[in-house]
Structure formats: C-alpha cells, structure tokens
Image: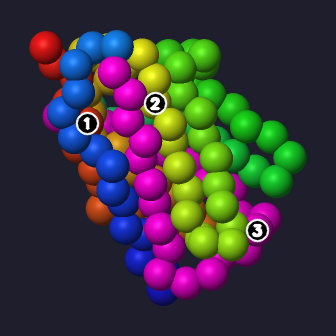
C-alpha cells in the first residue's frame, strides 16, 4: 500500500502560478509512470500530464503552461502550473503505481 500526499493547491489570480507536489509514503520504482489528473464537479477525471522514464506528455490545454517532473530520491512528483486560467480551476490528483492521491484544490479567480 502506498499513500500519496498532495500539497500546493490554493487560490491564485489568472496568470499566476502554482506548484503541486505529490509525496509517496514509501519508495516507488523509478520506472513507475506518474500522472496528474484534474476533475471538476460532475465531470470525469481528465489526464493533465504524464511522465515516464523516457518521455513526458501533456493534454493540449496544459502544453506550454504546465511542467511535470519527478524527484525519485524524494519519492516526490511535481506539477508546475504557469499562466493559470479560470478554466484550470479543479481538484488535481496524482496517480502513481496504481494509487491515487487525495486531491488538492486549485482555484483560479480574480
């Protein structure tokens, strides 16, 4: 069993930045893919970004604004979000090695 603890969410004005973190309760294989999803009320979770040992991929809405990264030595995974827009408002979840984080709320509003 792995617990993933997320942090870094909050309220920010349009154009602002946030960095989300997801820390695992134990070491996870460096080969495990890491994904960030987001979800708004009444909707399914949408993939935001994915990182493997060889590649990163982003949803179209995230390209050029979001950056996914990982620090395997700390079992911590990141999502840097820049130039945030009101439509980025959602609960963001990390998904690693078959486990979900608890989610962190991001609100983009003036």
Question: In the figure, 41 relative to 88: above or below?
Answer: below
Question: In the figure, 110 relative to 45: above or below?
Answer: above
Q: Toward which corner of the image does residue 34 lie, by quadrant?
A: bottom right
Count neighbours of disc 3 (C-alpha within 10 A) and say few if under 14, some if 14 to 19, many if 20 or more: some
Residue for badge 3: 30
Left or right of 11 on screen, residue 2: right
Q: Toward which corner of the image does residue 67 lie, by quadrant?
A: top right
Question: In the figure, 59 relative to 106: above or below?
Answer: above
Disc 3 or 1, which lies upstream in sequence? Answer: 3
Query: Which residue is found at the position 42% from the left and 69% from the top?
Result: 4
CA gap, disc 2 and disc 1: 10 Å
Outermost residue toward the left? 110
In the image, 12 versus 44, the foreground residue is 12
CA gap, disc 3 and disc 1: 28 Å
Residue for badge 1: 106
Query: Which residue is found at the position 69% from the left and 46% from the top?
Result: 51
Left or right of 38 on screen, residue 59: right
Q: What element carries label 3?
A: loop
CA gap, disc 3 and disc 2: 23 Å
Q: Position of residue 57 (x, y in %)?
A: 69, 32
Q: Position of residue 58 (x, y in %)?
A: 62, 28
Bounds of the magenta span? 16-42
In the image, 66 versus 43, the foreground residue is 66
Residue for badge 2: 81
Task: Check whether the beta carbons of the residues at disc 2 and disc 1 lie within 8 A of each other.
Answer: yes
Disc 2 or 1, which lies upstream in sequence? Answer: 2
| Residue 34 inside the magenta-drawn segment | yes
Q: Position of residue 78 (x, y in %)?
A: 53, 49
């Amino acid at each position: 069993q792995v617990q993933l603890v997320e942090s870094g969410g909050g309220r920010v004005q349009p154009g602002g930045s946030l960095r989300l973190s997801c820390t695992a309760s134990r070491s996870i294989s460096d080969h495990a893919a890491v994904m960030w999803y987001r979800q708004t009320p009444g909707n399914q979770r949408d993939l935001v970004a994915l990182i493997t040992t060889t590649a990163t991929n982003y949803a179209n809405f995230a390209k050029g604004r979001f950056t996914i990264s990982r620090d395997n030595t700390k079992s911590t995974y990141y999502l840097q979000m820049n130039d945030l827009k009101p439509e980025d408002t959602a609960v963001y979840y990390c998904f690693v090695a078959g486990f979900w984080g608890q989610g962190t709320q991001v609100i983009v509003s003036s």
